Image (spheres, rainbow, N blue to C red):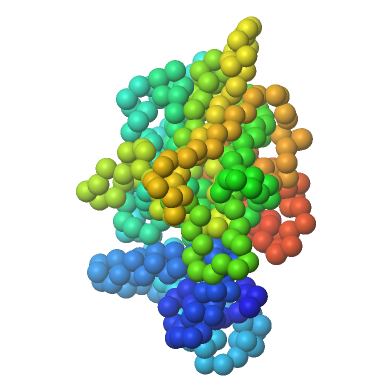
Amino acid sequence: MKMNLDDPKLTAYALGELEEPERSAIARAIADSPEAQRVVLETQQVAQALRLQYKLELKEEWIAPRRFIAVTDDSFWSKAGPLAIAAGLTLLALIGALALATNRSGSALHLADSSPRERAESGRFSAVEGEEATQFAPNPSRDFGAAPYNYVGEHPFVSVSSNPRSSFPIVVTSASYSEVLQSINAGILPPKNTVRIEQMINYFNYDYPGPLAEEPFSVNVDVVSCPWEQSHRLVRIGLKGRKASSDVHGANVIAKDAKIDVEFNPVRVGSYRLIGYDRRSLQGENSNREGARDHGIAAGYTVTALYELVPVAQQIVTRQEAQTLLSAKLQFKKPDGNGEVQSIERSVTNDGVDFAQAHPDLKFAAAVAEFGMILRDSEYKGNGTFAAVLEWAHEGKGSDANGYRAGFIELVRKAQALKKS
């Protein structure tokens, strides 16, 4: 059974509304479709986040005029039947809760003021040193898009000499993009605390090569000049899981306890910054400890992360190993193995590739990242503009079979118009 992504049964399945044997049939259909798995995960994460936000609103007994968002797509209702109507009503309830949350002037999510931009006399951002840097490491075991948190700020540039290693969560949802989309389509620029850049980047698919036959993942690393800060370098790290065999049904978990470590060469890199993964802490919990591991990874799963690097001054290097800019090491256990930790490692050199020659997928990911930074009014947005975002997105649009990238371009245009109004 091939899964139609427009089938309302997919939404009903994600929201737990199907009964057997239909539920099992849908589960088998999405097992071989990473795209369908992504739609299910998005729906579940958005529903979870909005249910929590709705509960917070009720708890505070806040009452205000609602902005209603109309659903005008007749094709949705033409899917017909009580099942489609039930799923539609559920989505309307979720969208209504989202509109309630985005229009409230004093959100239950606490947003602290951004710190002022600080640059060294050389024109670079000052880097965080020593133990202070460890406070800013993300916790890969948790996603904070669906829980109360205290906003602590964006990741700063971290000194490589004192903190050469970094990591990022492998499991990332894409719920933030849906929130940003709903807000802008409703004629409102999204609240800064709803803009999660890593979730926006991972809303889109990227064409990474598949893993080697004996490996469950491919680890892909490339580096180009940073388009919003020309003296810096932009690094993209992309993971892609092996697809499930056609005769296997179910969850298809291909690895467990997966974790990635990125190590920067202090001879080549002065400081680095992980883009997105904002520093947040759950109430009563220290969420900034690095090194936690994610749960199992499903077949065909992909994740993309971006780093911005400040290179060191040019110097004569005689050792071959000093040519390496950074290495990315993925560690994992096979789900049916003996618990032995296996690893895949990739290294990359700074070969001077300009952003103009970058892969279209990297250009598009950079456009999404800069769009998020502009929406957040980030101190790290550099000289990026909506016009530049549109240019990079057009260059990275590619074949765009599902039309998602064209939708992003239209979203940027709407945000640009809202910013001017």
Residue 1, horizontal then vertical, whole percent: 63, 78
Q: Residue drawn 55% across and 74% down? A: 28
Residue 36, horizontal then vertical, whole percent: 58, 68
Q: Is residue 296 above or below residue 151?
A: below
- Total numbered badges shown on the rendered structure: 0
Residue 184, horizontal then vertical, whole percent: 56, 61
Q: Is residue 296 above or below residue 232?
A: below
Q: Residue drawn 62% across and 14% down? A: 320
State which quadrant residue 382 falls in.
top right
Tell whether 351 sits left or right of 42.
right
Q: Nearer the viewer, residue 147 or 421?
A: 147
State which quadrant residue 61 falls in.
bottom left
Q: Residue drawn 62% across and 18% down? A: 323
State which quadrant residue 412 falls in.
bottom right
Residue 259, horizontal then vertical, whole percent: 44, 42
- In this orientation, does residue 420 appear? no
Q: Residue drawn 73% across and 45% down? A: 360
* In the image, farthest residue toward the front: 338
- For the C terminus, which image quadrant? bottom right
- In this orientation, does residue 350 appear? yes
